[in-house]
Every structure is written in structure tokens, then in C-alpha cells.
Amino acid sequence: MKRLALLPATALAVTLLLAGCSTLPPAPPPDTAAIPAAWRSPLPHGGSAAELARWWQAFDDPALARLVERAQAASPTLAQAAARRRQAEAGAAQARAGLMPQIGAQGQAQRGNSLNGLPGASSLLSAKLSASWEVDLFSGQRAGADAAAALAGAATADWHAARVSLAADVAQAYVQLRLAQAREEAAELDTRFAEQIAGWGRQQQAAGLISASDAALLNTSRAVAAAGRSQSRAEAQIALQTLALLCGSTADSLTAELAPPPVASEGLALRRSQPHAPAFDVNALPAGLLAQRPDVAAAHQRWLAALLQKRQADAQRWPQLNLSALAGGDLLRVGGRSQNTRPWSLGPTLTLPLFDGGALLASAEGAQAAADAAGAALQAQWQAAVAEVEEALQRVAAGAEREREVDAVRREWEGIARRTGAQALAGLQSGTQRNTTFRNALAAYDAVLGVRAEQALAWIRLYRTLGGGWQTTAQPTATPTPTPTAAPADPTTPTPPLASR
């Protein structure tokens, strides 16, 4: 009779299950492997920190590559990004574990009075083994696990973006440090020549050969040169502090390591150098480099995760089936008498949402809105990436042209300065004429320093906007020409909702 009494409940459960399965289920989840061809690219530097540091050796400055490597090892910002990546990967592993059956064991031992409602001192020993598995009828759990995996991929991309950004920040600060040190050297020499000219002016004024106003102008020029020297020293110290912060170090520890050569005691000898940007040929850059931008990859993974979370929310509106089993044994001893039981249970549990006041529908609509927002964010990120790369390429091309023009002026003034020095030694020119020519040559040299630094910073900006380095051969005489770098999407694979590229 008991078995017959269970038949109506079993029949009802089977009927509800068949009714749920006969209704059209939600759409299948998106294929996370079907990424547009324009975005299928290796991670920056192949995901290798050693390759990242090695790429900066193209600047032919060992200190720069060394600082980039040190910053990668000591930056707290990078450590935070790495921790967020591990956290996301752990969340993905936890979501995958939810797809598997869950098995657990429980043991219990008790000693007391009136255990199990029986009078007198008694002992109770209990052991149970339980198992449960939620059948993923409509792939909701699988969608949740895939969404967690996509978010882990986004966190990995964010970590690579932090590495690339940190390397670019270090390189930028290093270029600014060397620029300030080179300008300090030029300003020191300029101040020295200006002081000699001002001294000559005072002598001429005392002899009545020039007016007091002319002598004051010469002295003012000396003061301006000295102020420029002080400003360059301050800028060098600021750049050094920035480098120390990025490398997780102190400015004092970097001072000796990055100290420039001393200023020459006489003449126009310039000893301090700058990191030269390699003469990369922009035309040789692969068109798919934009695909390696970690921020674009992260936005794409977040869009996929939002679609999968929408799929998971839809699945919650359909029947849920859980299979469970329990087996164990209980031993109760009271007053020398024992009672042994072996409880067990096995069966499915079907849950069908009937009325929840619209909570599940609202959850699905919220997930759809989140997916739309993620798609719009992906579109904005892609468009911004294209614009940033175009701007960086324009700056590289303009910087190369300016460098050629200013370098020609520098060579002219260097030739004039050499001839002037030789003429002064031969007694054909005065020391004041020589010093004035040297100052003009230094002004031309200062312009060259600025343009070289701008060109190096333009390449660093391009490195940042491309999301990392590229493998290409440096050309001795490159003529950069800005060209679009966005590759067309593969028409055979699903494409995110981008209105334009």
C-alpha cells in the first residue's frame, strides 16, 4: 500500500519534468572559442616577463631594460593585478567544480543522558555517506562556469595590461631623466660661457666701451642660463623619484646607479647621452598588432561573460533536477543494550518555479542589460584603441621628420663651433665671440635633445597603445608612415556587436 501511495507523487513529478522539457528551452550559450580573427593574437611578448624585458634592449641602453625588469618584480600595482588574476582563476575552478557530483562523509560520536529520547546514560555512534548532483538540464551551470572562465581570462588580460603599462611608465620616466641630465650638462656649459661673457662685459663697462645697460643684459643672460641649469636639476630629481616609485625602491638607491658622467671642465665636450629609439619601420609592423591589446581582449572576455550570465539567468526560470543519495549506519547503546540502524535514501528532486513575483524575469532582464552594456563597452574600447594607435603613429612620423630637420641644424652649429674654436686658438677671433658661438651651438643642441626625447616617447606611446612590443627588424633609415592597424574580422566567426571599426 505504501508503494502504491507513492505512485501519484511520482507521476506528478514525471509529468512536470516532461512538461518542462517539452517547452522550448533557452537559446544555446555562445561559443567562447569563436573569437573574430582580428582578435586572435598572442599575448604581448608571448606572455613572458623575460621577453618583455628583452624587448627594451632594442633601445641599446642596458639600464633601461634593467629598470623594466626590476619594476616587474617589485611593483605593488602589478602584484595587485596578479592577485586579482589568481582570485578570478580560483572562482573559475570553483564554478567548474559545481558541475561535478558532490560527495561527502559525516561521522558523529556522542555520550550523554537521554540520547534519542531514551532514559539513562547512552552512547551514539553515527556514520553517513552522502552524494548529490544537480543535473544541468538547460546548461545554466555550464554557462556559469564558462562565464567565470571568461572573467578569469579578462583578469589575465588585465594583468598583462598592467605589465605593459608599467614597462611604458618606467621607460617614459627613464627618458625624461636622461633628457633632464643632458639638458643640465648643456645648461652648465651655457652658464659657464655666459659668465665669461658677463665678466667681459663688466670689464668693457669699466673701460667705458659699452653702456651699463648692455652690461646688465649680458648679466641677465647669465642669470637665465643659471636658472635653466637649476630647472634641469629639479626635473632630473623628479624623474628619479618617479623611477624609484615605479621600481619599488628609493631615490637614494638609484642615484649612484643612474648618475651621469661629470660635466667637462672646459671646452664644448658633451658626454651625457639619451636612450635612442630604435629606427623601427612602421610599415613592417604586423596589421594584427592591435589584436594583442590586453584591454581589448579583457573587454571581449567580459562581453562573453555577460552573455553567458544572461544564459545562466534564463536557465533559472526552468525546472531544476537534483539527484541525491544517502547511506550510513547508527549504533545506539543504552544500559548494555544496542540498537543498530542502517538508514539510506535515493531519489531525484525536481523543482519548478511557479510564481516568484517576477524576480527571475527581472534577473534575466538585468542580465540582458549587463550584456548590452558590456557590448557597448567593447565597441568603445575597440574604437578608442584604433584612435590611439592612429595618433601614436602620427606622432612617430612627425617626430622622425622633426628629428631630421633639427639634427641638420645641430650639425651646422657644431661645424661653426669647431671652426670658431680653431679660429680663437689662432687668434683670429676673441674669446667672447667664441663663447657666443658656443652658446648658439648649445641652443641648437638643446633643441635636438628635446626632439630626440619626443621621438623616444612617441615610440613608447606606440608600444603602450599597441598593448606591448612587436617582433620586427629595425631599419637604419626608416621613414614612418602612419597606417591603420586594425585587421578585418573573420566573416566565418561570430562578431561582437560593433557598429563600426
Image (cartoon, rainbow, N blue to C red):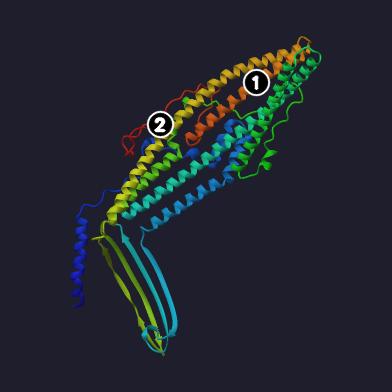
Quadrant where the C terminus sits is top left
- Hey, which residue is sitting farthest top in the picture? 428
Q: In this view, does 161 lie above or below 15?
A: above
Disc 1 residue type? Ala
Label 2 belongs to which residue? 486
Left or right position of 501 against 468: left
Point 68% across, 42% down: residue: 253
- Helix, strand or loop at disc 2? loop
* Image coordinates for residue 427, horizontal then vertical, percent: 79, 10
For the residues labelled 2 and 1, the Cα–Cα distance comes to 41 Å
Mark 2: few, some, or many residues within 10 Å (few <14, many ≥20)?
many
Point 36% across, 45% down: residue: 304
Label 1 belongs to which residue? 443
- Hey, which residue is sitting farthest right in the picture? 207
Which of the 4 image quadrants contains residue 268? top right
* Image coordinates for residue 451, horizontal then vertical, percent: 58, 24
**2 or 1: tag closer to the N-terminus:** 1
Quadrant where the N terminus sits is bottom left
Residue 310 in view (yes/no): no
Mark 1: few, some, or many residues within 10 Å (few <14, many ≥20)?
some
* Image coordinates for residue 390, horizontal then vertical, percent: 44, 28
**Marks 2, 1: nearer the viewer:** 1
Q: In this view, does 375 lie above or below 224?
A: below
Residue 300 in view (yes/no): yes
The mark tally for this picture is 2
Disc 2 residue type? Ala
Q: Nearer the viewer, residue 416 or 212?
A: 212
